[in-house]
């Protein structure tokens, strides 16, 4: 599997999920997530990223990727803690939605894919997907979650999470370009 | 015979020019060397009470806070040798990492802090390694005494081609500061001694000044924009608008001067008076610039 096909598959995967997000936006019930559903999406997004980072910590031998995965675990755990606290304070329990379901479905497929890879191919796929994933969650936050949040405190909490996601996206892109430069030999 | 008379004319001319230039060039560029600085008690006295000493008393030293995924403030003015404390008040761990790789704090956990001594660089950009969208910088605050001492102890500094805005403005300003007074003087003497060549030179010098001064102005605005409001507001307000006005005045003067030149005459009293006022404004403008660079 070469670099290009992996980037392409990551791009296609993210397009599919973004497409499904767009559909849920159009389709009646899922169009406007409620506050419990928004908390559910944020929670799912955090859990997915933590789970994949844990997998990456087990499989990767690259220090950069290891550090990144550890950072994802630390940052998203802290973010989730603050979401939990806020949920408790506002009396909001996370509820499932089309968006959280589609995130989980895509994540399951991605985890399966990652489990079948190792070495540089794994690092590449993990980081490529982290770039696509953070972009996708960032878009969902900006286009769907923030505009629909009813509670002002919840709204500002999601707005506050956006720079963190942007930071992860930028960091993942940096690693992506350094991996791309290092693994151009492409032989098996 | 003619040769002798002209050298008789030229020598006092040169001396007058030099005498005239001295205050202008001093205003634009006060001397750097410590012995000369010490001769000016006002400047020397001000150095012992740096602005940051007061700031340190108020807020307990130079400090950057990491909060809500950002460094606050985004640009901090620090004197070389001063300690800067970075405090993490965010819920995430961050690093303070120099863009040029000269330092890296390692992960600073929430609630922890880290210190650095400001090195001798004009501007030091840094970021957070795990969150590259967190960017900020430390800007070195000019300290005339130590800069002068350094120059004296290390001999002549080497030549570095200008690359930063704070290097372009002081270079370009010399052209403006030299050309306009010389043009005025040349016209004045040309009229007095009835020498067309002096008037011709004056016309060209005004034209050069009008062409170069917009660049001086742009470099000045550029410099100001990199300092993020750390300049004394009342001085920079006058300096920036007087400077911008000077750009327009010089262009108008050049147009006026060349209208006179086309008619083949020496400029009359009205032009000379307006130019003299412009020269005085330029001296005042230079003194304001010097005040901001070399201390209050």
Image: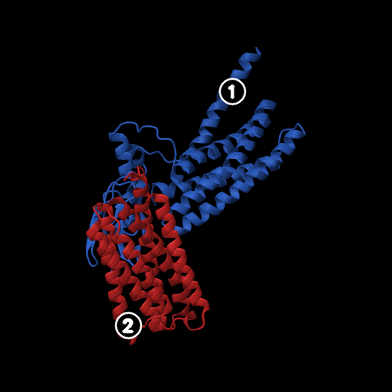
Disc 2, SS: helix
Q: What residue did someone put label 2 on? A: A87
Residue A126 location in percent, x, y? 33, 58
Residue A47 location in percent, x, y? 30, 72
Q: Is residue B269 left or right of residue B73?
A: right
Residue at 63% in and 14% down: B3
Residue at 39% in and 81% down: A37
Compared to residue A70, the image places residue B161 above or below, namely above
Colour blue, chain: B
**Crowd band around label 1 with a 10 angstrom C-alpha radius: few (<14), some (14–19), many (20+):** few
Q: What residue did someone put label 1 on? A: B10
Q: Nearer the viewer, residue B157 or B100?
A: B100
Colour red, chain: A
Residue at 26% in and 66% down: A74
Please report, as a chain letter, where disc 1 is located: B
Residue at 36% in and 46% down: B122
Q: Nearer the viewer, residue A157 or B251?
A: A157
- Determine which quarter of the picture holds residue B129: bottom left
Residue A73 location in percent, x, y? 26, 66
Disc 1, SS: helix
User: Is residue B73 at all visible to an observer of this figure?
Assistant: no
């Amino acid at each position: 599997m070469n670099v290009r096909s992996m980037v392409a598959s990551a791009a296609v995967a993210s397009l599919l999920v973004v497409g499904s997000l767009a559909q849920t936006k159009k389709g009646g019930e899922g169009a406007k997530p409620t506050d419990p559903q928004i908390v559910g999406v944020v929670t799912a997004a955090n859990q997915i990223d933590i789970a994949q980072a844990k997998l990456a910590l087990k499989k990767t031998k690259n220090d950069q990727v290891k550090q990144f995965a550890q950072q994802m675990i630390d940052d998203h755990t802290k973010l989730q803690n603050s979401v939990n606290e806020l949920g408790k304070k506002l009396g909001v329990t996370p509820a499932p939605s089309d968006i959280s379901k589609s995130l989980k479905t895509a994540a399951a497929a991605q985890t399966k894919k990652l489990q079948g890879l190792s070495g540089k191919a794994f690092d590449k796929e993990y980081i490529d997907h982290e770039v696509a994933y953070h972009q996708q969650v960032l878009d969902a936050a900006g286009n769907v979650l923030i505009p629909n949040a009813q509670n002002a405190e919840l709204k500002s909490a999601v707005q506050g999470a956006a720079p963190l996601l942007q930071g992860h996206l930028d960091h993942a892109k940096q690693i992506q370009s350094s991996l791309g430069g290092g693994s151009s030999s492409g032989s098996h | 015979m003619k040769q002798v008379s002209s050298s008789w004319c030229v020598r006092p001319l040169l001396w007058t020019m030099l005498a005239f230039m001295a205050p202008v060039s001093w205003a634009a560029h006060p001397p750097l060397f410590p012995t000369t600085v010490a001769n000016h008690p006002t400047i020397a006295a001000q150095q012992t009470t740096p602005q940051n000493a007061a700031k340190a008393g108020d807020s307990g030293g130079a400090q950057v806070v990491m909060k809500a995924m950002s460094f606050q403030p985004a640009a901090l003015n620090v004197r070389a040798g001063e300690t800067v404390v970075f405090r993490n008040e965010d819920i995430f761990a961050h690093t303070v990492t120099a863009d040029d790789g000269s330092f890296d704090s390692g992960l600073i956990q929430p609630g922890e802090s880290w210190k650095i001594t400001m090195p001798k660089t004009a501007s030091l950009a840094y970021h957070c390694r795990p969150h590259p969208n967190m960017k900020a910088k430390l800007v070195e605050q000019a300290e005339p005494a130590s800069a002068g001492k350094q120059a004296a102890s290390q001999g002549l500094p080497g030549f570095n081609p200008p690359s930063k805005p704070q290097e372009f403005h002081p270079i370009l300003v010399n052209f403006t500061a030299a050309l306009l007074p010389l043009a005025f003087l040349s016209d004045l003497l040309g009229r007095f001694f009835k020498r067309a060549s002096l008037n011709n030179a004056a016309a060209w010098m005004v034209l050069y000044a009008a062409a170069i001064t917009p660049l001086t102005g742009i470099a000045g605005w550029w410099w100001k924009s990199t300092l993020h409001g750390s300049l004394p507001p009342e001085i920079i307000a006058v300096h920036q608008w007087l400077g911008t006005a000077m750009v327009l005045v010089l262009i108008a003067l050049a147009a006026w001067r060349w209208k006179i030149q086309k008619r083949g005459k020496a400029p009359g009293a009205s032009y000379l008076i307006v130019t003299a006022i412009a020269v005085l404004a330029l001296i005042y403008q230079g003194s304001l610039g010097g005040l901001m660079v070399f201390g209050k």
